[in-house]
Each structure stands twice: as C-alpha cells, then as structure tokens.
Image (tube, grey):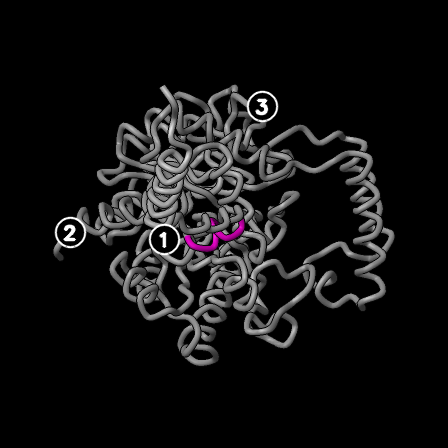
Amino acid sequence: MRMNPTRYGIAAVAVLVVLAALWTLRPVREPEAPKPTPEEVAARIHESVITIDTHVDIPSFFGSDKYDPALRNTWPVQVDLPRMRDGGLDAVFFIVYVSQTERTPFGYAEAASEALAKFAAIRRMTDIQYKDQIGLALTAADVRRLHEEKKRIALIGIENGYSIAQEPALIDFYYSLGARYFGLVHNGHNDLADSAQPQEKFSDKPNGEGGEHDGLSALGRAAIARANDLGMMVDVSHASRAATLAAIEASRAPVIASHSAVLALRDHPRNISDDEMKALAAKGGVVQIVAFDEYLHEVPAEKKKARADLAGALGLTSLDAVFSADEETKQEYLDGVARLDEKWPRATVATLADHIDYAVKLIGIDHVGIASDFQGGGGIEGWSHAGETQNVTMELLRRGYGEEEIAKLWGGNLLRVMEAAEKARKAS
C-alpha cells in the first residue's frame, strides 16, 4: 500500500501546532526568591520578639559626659542606645551593684550611697535625659507596652544584698526606686547569704566548711520574704550552692539566676550545677546563661596575669581610671589584649550556645535565658557589645532553634517569671 506523503505532512504539522499551544498554556513558574541570609532572618526575628539582657553593669557616673548612653560609644562602654538599636536589643536590666567591703557602719553607709548613686543615674536617663528613647519598666506589662511603642526598655536589678545593710526595710525603698530583682550576694559572704566565692581578705569561712550561714541567714530569709511580698524577683547568681538551694526553697515565687554559666561544662565556683538548675526549674525559675569568657571556658592563669600586668602598667587599675584614660592609652591596652586573645582565644558565641544547649536539654526550653554581664567582665568573640546581639540569634538558628524557642530564650521566660513574682506579691 502506498503512503500519502501530503496526508502525513499535514498530520505532523497539526501535532506541532497542538504542542506549541500546550507549551504556550503551560503554568509559568515565577523565579524563586533568593533565600534570606542568616543576618536577614535574625533581623526579622528581632523585629518581633522582645530581647532582654538581664545583666549590664554601670558605673556611678553613668549618664554623665564620661558615659552618655545616648551616644555611640567605644570601649570600655559596651551598651548604649544606638548599639542597642543596631543589635536588636530591646531591654536591659541595668545593675545597681555594690562591692563587698568590711561589714561596719561605714561600709554599710558607703554601700547604700553607691547604690543610690546608680539608682539616680538610671532614673535620670529614663525620666529626664532620654525619656523619648527609653522607658523604665516596673512590670512585665510595661515591658510589652514600651516594646509596642518602639522604645528601648530599662529595668533595674540589685547585685549584692550588702546594699540593704541589716535592714530588710531598705528593700521597700529600692523597690520604690524601680528595682525588680534582688541579688543576694556577690564575691564574699555578707549578712544575708554565703557567696560562691568566699574572700580571704574578709576571713570568710570556706563553703566546704559550711560557709558562714550554711547557705542563708535568718536575715537572708527575711529579705527573700520581703522581696516576695513586694513582687521582686530573687536572684541567686553569685550565691553558694547551699545558699542557692535554700533560697529556691524559701521563696514562694520562682527564682532567677541572672547571669550564670553551666558548671558541668566549665568547673568554676560561679557556675550553676545540675542540681541547682533542676531545683530552680522545678520552682518555675530561669537561669540566664552568661557571655562571660572565664565562666564559659578555662582561661589560662598566664593570660590573666599578662592582662592584669598590662592594665597595671598603663594605670588602668579601676573603672574610673579606665574611663578617664586618654584614647592613646585605651588603644594601647586594647592592642595588648588583642595580642593575648590571639595567643589564647576568647570564648565565642558558639561556646555560649553550648552552655545554652546543655541547660535546655537538662531543664527544658522554658527555664533558660541569656545575659551578657557587659561592663562587669562580660563579652566574648562575636558578642562583645550590644550592637552584636543578633550574632547570638544567628548561632541559635544554625543549631536549629525556631523563632518561638528563641523568643523564650531572649526574654519570654524571664517575663513569665517576672509575672509570677508580681502575682506572688501581697496585696498589702
């Protein structure tokens, strides 16, 4: 049988026409949007979550020309309003810290005076100088309101109950000035509690021998009860293990460790043990993992001595001396520290995240938070000032934490504890 070439040619053309029509009608795939960078994801998260750093120290001249928080400062300042905005850091507990000295009438008076100077400096910033940029939060609701108003947020914490002398009634006064957590102790035992780091210069009894109070004194228990009555959180960072466990038991509200790292990962007396973390979590509390180099990993004694020798040689032997130094001296010190860091590297945001991971696995995501201890010795590679805060978030993202978990770590958990403390307050 003979084939008709004309007929088959027409058929081929028809098939081509149909195929062309189908090709024309195919769904047009939009070009895929570029995948956001880790920096972009972190920035988006910081737009929505409330980011709280629970421990930033200040000098008594905070708010003066030496340390103006509205300016973009350089070292030794690590926290100011411009860099809080840069790093997506919304809220800071500015700390009313007093150093431990001899327990004498003069020592008590000096501690109270130091505390009041810092309260005044914080309130001057929020109430007078920069009230259009930063507000003082007295409640968890205040924190949320100020965040909605796009303001930075100041909160106040007390470090070292030595500032109340032997008068729990002073807690009421400090509360009226804005304090919302009360740290029982610092380096050296005081009248309230035993310290994690007893001081030989005060003839402190070692904790292995029961410390001074076997943890808490009657005055310490009275101070905790008064803080509960007021709705003020109790802070056990710097407390001995016995004092921490006793404080958790004595408090009727959840307790915080405002700036501590994990003992199991770094054997340092300032760090918090598994038993302490479990007890804290069982009471509903939160441990704020701190970005403090020596608490996160071991720092060789040789490096610490070299750094101290460098500071001594340059006359940088006090906070006032550091702030008063000329720029050339400051730079000489920073260059020297950089050489030491090159030889003995600092902890990094990854080291910090290792401690966060450990705590989360041990006690759960609802009981862990983050703190810097900036201007009190804190600062690590990648998070050396407030402007680098998002680097911590990027590391958490790399480790698989989701936005809801990051929101809890950066402030959600702390606000829950703050609300619990407020609910435990006595109506009177």
Rendered-image quadrant of the C terminus: bottom left
Mark 2 against mark 1, which lies toward the viewer? Answer: 1
Q: Is residue 367 above or below residue 119?
A: above
Q: Is residue 272 above or below residue 381?
A: above
In the picture, measured across the screen, residue 374 lies left or right of residue 341, that is: left
* Secondary structure of the residue carrying numbered label 2: loop
Tell me the number on the disc at residue 49.
1
Boundaries of the magenta span: 39-44
Q: Is residue 244 above or below residue 38?
A: above
Amino acid type of the residue that numbered disc 3 sits on in the rendered structure: Asp
Q: Which residue is mark 3?
A: 267
Give the residue displayed 54% in from the left and 33% down from the top.
270
Residue 256 in sight here? no
* Secondary structure of the residue carrying numbered label 3: loop
Q: Which residue is mark 2?
A: 426
Amino acid type of the residue that numbered disc 1 sits on in the rendered structure: Val
Q: Determine which quarter of the picture holds residue 400.
A: top left
Mark 2 against mark 3, which lies toward the viewer? Answer: 3
Q: Position of residue 12 (x, y in %)?
A: 39, 37
Amino acid type of the residue that numbered disc 2 sits on in the rendered structure: Lys
Label 2 to label 3: alpha-carbon separation: 39 Å
